[in-house]
Amino acid sequence: MSEIDEKSKSDDKKVIEMEEKEKMLNEENKAHDVIAEVEQSVGKDGEKETSKIIKTEGREVQPKKIPIGGIQMPGFFTRSKSKEKCKDGDAEIEGTELLDSKEKESKDEQIQPTRIKLPNPFRKSKALSEEDVSGGSEPKEKKRLLQSIRLPLVSVCPRKKRDEQKLESRSGKAGLASVETLDDTEKKEEELKSIPLDDKKNLEKQENDQTWRQKLKAYRIVISALLVFILLVIIIVAFAIPGKSRLTSVIRNGKYVQTITSCGKVEGLLDDGAVAFRGIPYARPPLNDLRFKPAQPLNDLAYCWNFTEPFQAYNSTNTCFQLYSNGTAVGEEDCLTLDVVTPDVRYDTPLPVIVLIGAETLMGGSPGKMRPSARFARSKDVVYVRPNFRLGALGFLAANVLTKSVHPPTSGNYGLSDIVEALKWVQLNIEHFGGDKNSVTLFGHRAGATLVTALATTKDAKLLFKQAWASSGSTIFPTKTLSESERGSSSYLEAISCDSVNCLREKEPEVLTNNIEDLWRKPIFDLPTPTEDPTKRHEWLVMDGNIIRDSPRVLWSREEGIPVQLIIGTTAHAAYSEKLRLKYTDWTEELVKKHVNESKIGHSNLTEEVFKLYPPSFRGLVTMISDIRIVCPLFYMTEEMPNTTFYVVSQPRGELDIADVDSDIDAIFGRYEPKTVAQRRYVSSIQQLFYYFITHRKIGLEKTKRVLVVEQDALPQDTYSHCDFWKKHDFVPKYSQLD
């Protein structure tokens, strides 16, 4: 019969049992004398009866069953047999039996002492049996009553002892039956688990963990609400506490905006959602003694305007004196001013700055298409700056009499010095117009692109701007020394009858402009003639030893390249000329072939080969001229420049279906009027390339090819069509455009 498992008792049963034990002990102490008299005789009878139960090996002692409906009262009919039950080697097994008959009352260990005199199993002086002594183990520490009450269902015996007792019961040793009978099935055995006292700490830890989990689960809504509240407080505080304030200028009378410069206050006007400041002086007027001298800065208050009143920068000043392609000379000498168009006058978030340099030739046609757009300044978040600069003889004349008049001796490139001084003004003042002086892009078109490319090769370029974009410029840069350039100007001085500096400074600007030799003028775009001699062309730019100290071609071909990032490009029909188109009312195939055959191409016996590459149409003729004069020379020039990107716009427009010289500029400034889906895609593509370059200093595409052809999309290519043919026959770069 299996041993009594105290684990199956509930808390209430345990308490009742303990109370009964205590009561019975008190009664036993009172009746100790009576029990002592009959202890010996009754003890013998008990031993016989016990041995009768135990000696039968292999015989399972059947438990007494509680009738159905009976109340199981642990402790009421039972008591512990021995306090020594946890001793090693103890053969006695704690048990109880149901008191169901008068015949077995004398044999029961839990009989009432007043009716039947039995040995006291709880007597402290009970001797150990031989089996106990042979075990050789010392009795374990008794379990206190309060510990048993605090830990219900806890076995008083160690787990090891219970396992040994189970083995003994299975080997045939029967124990005393319990009043609460146990089921013999293994399933019942597994359900009756005990909790060792050694696991008290683990139990408490598990209870604590479970308690915390229950608390968190119970208050999860409150905790979530508290976290949300804290987050809202943080957000409110973040918005409530003022950070770096956005400093903007006050708008006066709804249209006037003021800011400050190194020379005093200036006041501009609201223009299409942006602010425009026009005609701000950036250098001293190049008059009298300052004519034919580099630009002089406004480095003295005497050169500035009245500090008490702001400079009214409402209207653009006239352009510098220049000669247009139609022979008209217009402009003023007092012209060194600039325009600034900005989305807003602020200091918190400076914007990229684009300095616009535009001119058809180095003699005139400025600013051309390079006019800032207030709408695009606002939509693209950029600041536009467009300076005026000197052109023609007033801007680039190099002469011996001029060189001797200054120290160190030099002359020429005055217009280039104007742009340099404007860039210095930008570095000093652009922050007061919402611009970032560390993000300046120099953007040139046509002759302006030639000047931009030249400035990109100078040593101080990186101090004035970070990157440059040059569209449809020239590849002709100074290759002659300053003295050689001075000798080339002797015929011009003879034409105006001047041999001194004073004479040159006293001449009217119209006289200086109208007497320029024809070879110094830019010819109409056309195919090279049989008599054209490129060596006799005039080079406006000179190696003055101040700005241009060495040949730009030598500088950019070095391994380190130029000091700033440069993008060079053009359009597929950049050499289109309205005068050439009007030469014939209708350019038929025969007229096109005749025109080609009469040119240098025909005299080189290349007419048939050329028309295998180009169609015999006016559009094909314009493509041919553009390749010889602009596209292919620029393509091969950029091949000499490390880390320089070259692009060609080929998306056509207009009645002639050509990509004219202004196609890229108009699209960049939003003046291109797309009429087809392809044209809309082109505008988006070229704008993305340009404005990505402005902000990131790269075009957004990996340079894996030699040229970027921009039509509907930007497509990299290994080469540009037909350029190798013209280079092979020595047309490129020999016949490149002048400026």
Image (tube, rainbow, N blue to C red):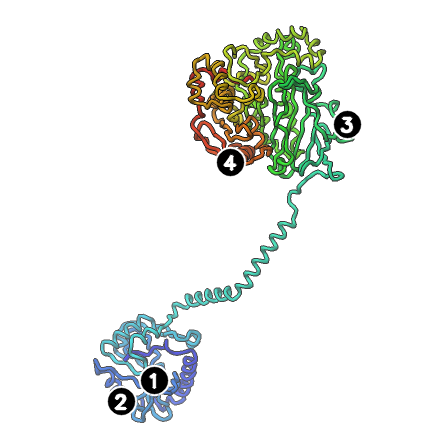
Nearer to us: label 4 or label 3: 4
Query: Tag 1: residue type?
Result: Val
CB atoms at circles 4 and 3 under 8 Å apart?
Answer: no
- Label 1 belongs to which residue? 179
Relative placement, left or right, of 62 versus 630 is left
Nearer to us: label 3 or label 2: 3
Percent of width and height locating residue 273: 67, 38
Percent of width and height locating residue 22: 42, 83
Query: Tag 4: residue type?
Result: Ala
Neighbor class of circle 4 (other Cα within 10 Å; few <14, some 14-19, many 20+) is some
Nearer to us: label 4 or label 2: 4
Nearer to us: label 3 or label 1: 3
Query: Residue drawn 68% across and 6% down?
Result: 497
Percent of width and height locating residue 404: 64, 9
- Label 4 belongs to which residue? 678
CB atoms at circles 3 and 1 under 8 Å apart?
Answer: no
